[in-house]
Image: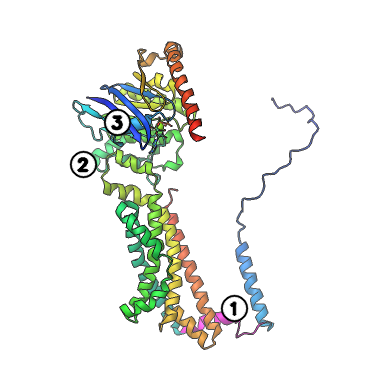
C-alpha cells in the first residue's frame, strides 16, 4: 500500500503488545548497590548493638581482623598454603581426569570398563578417604593433595568424556574423509571441539578443590585457611573466623574470574 | 580413471537402504544422483568415497589417478562441516596439513582455491561470521585444495535459500567450465541435477535401486528451461511417483 499522507487513519484500537518479559536484562550497578546496602545494614545492626558481636561480628571488625592478619603476614601464609594445595591437587586431578576422560570418550574397551567404575566411585565423598590417605601418604601435604586430586579427577573425567561425545560426528567424518590420521583427528577436531565442555568442567572441579582444601585443612593442618577458620572458631575469635570465610569467597571469585577470562579467550569462535 | 560400482547393497541392521546398484562414474563427468528422501543417496555417496563399508558388492577404481591428486575421494557436505574454531584459511589448510607439501606450496594452493571461490577477502573470517553461501564456498574451496580425483557432493545446496542456491550453481558451472573434475552430485532437486550434470541417475524409493539413467545431451551453456523442458517433464513424472510413495511410506513408518 503506498503511503498516503492525506488519508485519515482508519479508526480502531492499537493491537495490544503481548511479547514482553522472559528476557532478563542486566541492570548495571544493581548488584553493587544491593551488596553495599546489605553490608551497611549489617554494620548498622552491629553498631546499634542489635546483635551480639561474638555471634556475628560487624563488617568493620572483620575488616580490622583481616588487616591485622595481613600486617603480621599470617594471612598470606595461610592463603599460600591453601593455594599450593589447591593448585597441586587440581593439576594432578585434572591431568589424570582428562587422560581417563578422553580414553573413555575414544576407546570402546576403556569406556566399557571405565564408565561403570567412574559412576560407582564418583558419589563417594572424597573427604571420607582422607584418613586412609593419611595412612598411605603420611600426615603431611601429600594426603591433602591426594584428596583434592581425587575429588577433581571424577568431575573432570566425566566432563571430558561428555565433551568428547558431544563433538559432532559430522566433523570427525569430515576429517576422516580428508584422510587425516587418527592422532591428527584427536588433536585438530576432538580436542578443540571438546574444549567448551572441558572448560565448564573446570568450573565445577575448581569449586570442589576449594571445598576439599578447607575440609582437609580442618581435619588436620597447622596452616591453610581451613586451619585458620577452625582455630579461630575454637578460640571464639569469630571476627577472624569470618575473615577466613571472606578470603575463601574472594578466592572463589578470583578462580571464577580467571576461568571466565580463559573461556572468553579460548572460545572466541563460538 | 573410472569408478565402477558393482552390485552394491547396504543395510543398516534390518533396514535395507540400497540394493543392487551397478553404475560407473566416468572420467571427467558430472553424475547427478537423484531420488526421494531416505532412498539411500547419502549412503551410496558414503560407500563411493570409502566412508561406509557396503554390506554387498564393491566399488573399484579403474585406471590411474590424475597426477597431483592428494585426496582421491573428497566430499562437500550438506552441513558444510567446517571447524568453527578455524578461520576460512585454516579450514582449507586442514585438507593440506597432513600432506607433505612445502609451506610455500601449501600457501599457493590455499591462495588459488580462495581466488577460485571468491573467498580471498574472507580468509581470516571465522565460519560464524559468514553467510550459509559463503560457508559452503569454503567447503568447496577446501575440497578443491585437496586436489580430488572424484568430488563427492552430498546435497551441497540443500541448507541454502533459493537465491544463494542459484548463485552457487553459477559458481559450480564456472568451476566445471574451468577444470574438468569428475564429480558425483547428490540432490533431491531435479532442476539442480539437470542444470549441472552430464548424466542423471534416478533412484527409486527405499531400498534404493536404479530406476533410470539419463544423459543430459544439451550443452551446459545452452540449458535454458525451454531446452530442458521435455527431459524435465519426463523425469519429473518418474520422481514424482517415487517421492509420493516414499512420502506415504515414511508416514506409515512413524505411525
Ligand atoms: N546410521 C544409520 N543407521 C540406521 N539407519 C540409517 C543410518 N543412516 C541412514 N539410515 C537410513 O537409511 C536410509 C537411507 O539413508 P540415506 O541418508 O542414505 O538417504 P538419503 O537418500 O541421503 O536421504 P535424504 O534425502 O534424507 O538425505 C534412510 O531410511 C535412513 O533413515
Ligand atoms: Mg542424504
Q: Are marks 3 and 1 in contact (CB under 8 Å)?
A: no
Task: Locate ligand 1 by image quadrant.
Answer: top left
Q: Residues within 10 Å of mark 2 (few under 14, many from 20)?
A: few
User: Is disc 3 in the same subunit as disc 1?
Assistant: no
The residue lying toward the viewer, choosing from A119 and A220, is: A119
The quadrant holding residue A19 is: top right
Residue A118 screen position, x and y as percent: 38, 62
Q: Label 2, label 3: how many angstroms apart (C-alpha)?
A: 25 Å
Q: Residue at x 63, y 66 (%)?
A: A33
Q: Are marks 2 and 1 in contact (CB under 8 Å)?
A: no
Residue under circle 1? A59
Residue A39 visible (yes or no): yes
**Colouring scheme applied when the structure was drawn:** rainbow
* Disc 3 CB within 8 Å of nearest ligand 1 atom: no
Tell me the magenta residue range. A51-71
The quadrant holding residue B132 is: top left
User: Which residue occupies the extreme bottom position in the image?
Assistant: A235
Q: Residues within 10 Å of mark 3 (few under 14, many from 20)?
A: many
Subunit that carries the residue with mark 1: A
Subunit that carries the residue with mark 3: B
Q: Is residue B122 above or below residue A260?
A: above
User: Is disc 2 in the same subunit as disc 1?
Assistant: no
Residue under circle 2? B100
Q: Label 3, label 1: how many angstroms apart (C-alpha)?
A: 73 Å
The residue lying toward the viewer, choosing from B30 and B223, is: B30
Residue B24 screen position, x and y as percent: 27, 22
The quadrant holding residue B222 is: top left
Residue under circle 3? B48
Amino acid at each position: 500500500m503506498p503511503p498516503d499522507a492525506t488519508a485519515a487513519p482508519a479508526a480502531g484500537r492499537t493491537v495490544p503488545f503481548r511479547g514482553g518479559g522472559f528476557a532478563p536484562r542486566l541492570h548495571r550497578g544493581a548488584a553493587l548497590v544491593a551488596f553495599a546496602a546489605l553490608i551497611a545494614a549489617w554494620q548498622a545492626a552491629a553498631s546499634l548493638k542489635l546483635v551480639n558481636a561474638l555471634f556475628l561480628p560487624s563488617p568493620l571488625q572483620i575488616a580490622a581482623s583481616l588487616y591485622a592478619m595481613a600486617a603480621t603476614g599470617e594471612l598470606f601464609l595461610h592463603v599460600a598454603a591453601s593455594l599450593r594445595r589447591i593448585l597441586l591437587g587440581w593439576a594432578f586431578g585434572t591431568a589424570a581426569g582428562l587422560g581417563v576422560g578422553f580414553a573413555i570418550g575414544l576407546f570402546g574397551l576403556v569406556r566399557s570398563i571405565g564408565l561403570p567404575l567412574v559412576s560407582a566411585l564418583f558419589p563417594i565423598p572424597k573427604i571420607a578417604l582422607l584418613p586412609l590417605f593419611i595412612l598411605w601418604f603420611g600426615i603431611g601435604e601429600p594426603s591433602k593433595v591426594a584428596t583434592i586430586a581425587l575429588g577433581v579427577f571424577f568431575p573432570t573425567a566425566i566432563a571430558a568424556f561428555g565433551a568428547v561425545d558431544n563433538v559432532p560426528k559430522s566433523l570427525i567424518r569430515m576429517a576422516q574423509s580428508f584422510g587425516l590420521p587418527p592422532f591428527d583427528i584427536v588433536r585438530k577436531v576432538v580436542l578443540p571441539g571438546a574444549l567448551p565442555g572441558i572448560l565448564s568442567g573446570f568450573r565445577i572441579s575448581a569449586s570442589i578443590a576449594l571445598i576439599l582444601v578447607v575440609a582437609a585443612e580442618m581435619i588436620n593442618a597447622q596452616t591453610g585457611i581451613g586451619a585458620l577458620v577452625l582455630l579461630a572458631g575454637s578460640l571464639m575469635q569469630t571476627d577472624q573466623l569470618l575473615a577466613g570465610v571472606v578470603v575463601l569467597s574472594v578466592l572463589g571469585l578470583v578462580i571464577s574470574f580467571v576461568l571466565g577470562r580463559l573461556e572468553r579467550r579460548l572460545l572466541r569462535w563460538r | 580413471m573410472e569408478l565402477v560400482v558393482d552390485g552394491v547393497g547396504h543395510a543398516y541392521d534390518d533396514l535395507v537402504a540400497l540394493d543392487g546398484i551397478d553404475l560407473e562414474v566416468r572420467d571427467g563427468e558430472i553424475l547427478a544422483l537423484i531420488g526421494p528422501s531416505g532412498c539411500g543417496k547419502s549412503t551410496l555417496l558414503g560407500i563411493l568415497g570409502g566412508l561406509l563399508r557396503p554390506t554387498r558388492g564393491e566399488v573399484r577404481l579403474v585406471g590411474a589417478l590424475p597426477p597431483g591428486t592428494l585426496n582421491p575421494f573428497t566430499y562437500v557436505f550438506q552441513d558444510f562441516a567446517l571447524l568453527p574454531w578455524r578461520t576460512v584459511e585454516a579450514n582449507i589448510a586442514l585438507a593440506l596439513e597432513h600432506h607433505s607439501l612445502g609451506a610455500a606450496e601449501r600457501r599457493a594452493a590455499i591462495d588459488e582455491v580462495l581466488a577460485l571461490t571468491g573467498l580471498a577477502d574472507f580468509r581470516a573470517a571465522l565460519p560464524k561470521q559468514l553467510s550459509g553461501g559463503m560457508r559452503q564456498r569454503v567447503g568447496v574451496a577446501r575440497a578443491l585444495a585437496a586436489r580430488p580425483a572424484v568430488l563427492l557432493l552430498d546435497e551441497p545446496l540443500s541448507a541454502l535459500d533459493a537465491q544463494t542456491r542459484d548463485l552457487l550453481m553459477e559458481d559450480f558451472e564456472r568451476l566445471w567450465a574451468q577444470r574438468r573434475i569428475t564429480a558425483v552430485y547428490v540432490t533431491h532437486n531435479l532442476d539442480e541435477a539437470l542444470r549441472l550434470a552430464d548424466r542423471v541417475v534416478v533412484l527409486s524409493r527405499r531400498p534404493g535401486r536404479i530406476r533410470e539413467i539419463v544423459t543430459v545431451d544439451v550443452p551446459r551453456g545452452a540449458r535454458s528451461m525451454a531446452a530442458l523442458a521435455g527431459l524435465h517433464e519426463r523425469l519429473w513424472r518418474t520422481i514424482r511417483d517415487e517421492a509420493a510413495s516414499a512420502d506415504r511410506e515414511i508416514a506409515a513408518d512413524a505411525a
